[in-house]
Image (cartoon, grey):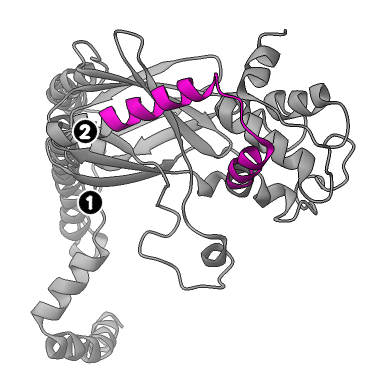
Amino acid sequence: MHLQAKRLSKLALSPVLMILSMLGTAAWAEEAQRWQTNLTPGVTELGAKIYDLHMTVFWICVWIGVVVFGLMLYSILTHRKSLGAKPADFHESTTVEIAWTIVPFIILIVIAFPATTTLLEVYDTDDADLDVMITGYQWKWKYEYMDPNGDNVSFFSNLRTGKNEIYNEDAKGQHYLLEVDEPMVLPVNKKVRFLVTANDVIHSWWVPALSVKRDAIPGFINETWSKPIKTGVYRGQCAELCGKDHGFMPIVVNVVEEAEYQTWLSKKKAQSAEIKALMSKNFSLDEQMAAGKAVYDKSCAACHGTNGEGGVGKAIAGSAIATGALAGHLTVGVNGVPGTAMQAFGGQINDVDMAAVITYQRNAFGNNMGDVVQPIDVYNFKLGK
């Protein structure tokens, strides 16, 4: 019976072996490369250390498995009943019990030393060259570059993938759901400390190539750091289920040379200075309508409709808010509506854009209220004046 089973197994395997030989080793090497799964060292020295630690522990586990299962296989083959082996009649062995206690202990000590050293380095956020505050929103990221002189630069990073791609009306691009309108920009070979928090629910900022993954929790600030040693574009995602559009808040980090980073930062500071200058300006209705439409199309149309007809959110056209008291409209725009999809945009867009979009909503879609909201009006509203 045993010989018959072996003969049948050979017959079954022979076609498979023939096919493998026909395909050739090169093809199988390519296929193995395509299917292999492992960590990557990324573009940081810390990431390389984490990768090396992972591979060290992995091979230790492999050799433990080889030894344990090898001994099991040897015992099964050489001490089976068909060879006349007789079971031992002892119940315990002090030597064996000491050995299988001491050997795992030594293995754990060998693993613990590099693991502890690496873990301490992971949490060492001291002596950073740059601090960046990261705030998670449903469903976008806000980045604020902290300046020792108080001249901070902040901006939001939103998904750039178009709705047509998402709804399968257009072909999906190369970086589908992994592209943003405003990427984070970092200088190469600089230690960057990330201060991670959230505005609404729990998010998680994760960029594998930078060896960074940290939860963003409302009311708490978690610290982590990275020091990229290679320029390039590195992508990540929110790694915490944060709501229905969880998959629509990607992360893109551009690591550039120091000179390019300083040029980018200077432009951002100039934009911030321009917005501050605009705070004291009085805009005409036509100016606010043009600027407000741009803000509406970017931040409001997805929920309230291109023509204010409503959708996920309520209609703007003819609504009691848009045609009611200005204070009520500002309250909804700045503070949002708790318990609904209407977010508080007071911290997401600046006062200049808020004034423009409120003006647009009150005068577009047939509302025609005639109000011209100025940036200083929004500023004073936030102060309670």
The image position of residue 365, as x and y in percent, is 79, 51
Magenta-highlighted residues: 266-294
Q: Nearer the viewer, mark 2 or mark 1?
A: 2
Q: Residue 110 location, x and y as percent?
A: 12, 24
Residue for badge 2: 263
Q: Amino acid at mark 2?
A: Thr
Q: Residue at x 88, y 31 (%)?
A: 324
Residue 114 position, x and y percent, is: 13, 23
Q: Does residue 254 sit above or below 333 in this rendering? A: below
Find residue 83 and report its image quarter: bottom left
Task: Please state which of residues 147 and 340 is positioned toward the viewer in this rendering.
Answer: 147
Q: Horizontally, is 301 left or right of 172 in the view? A: right
What kind of element bears circle 2?
helix
Q: CA distance from mark 2 to mark 1?
A: 81 Å
Q: Is residue 197 left or right of residue 184?
A: right
Examine the residues drawn in magenta and state their main secondary structure: helix
- Check disc 1 and give the amino acid type: Lys
Which residue has dot 1 on it? 86
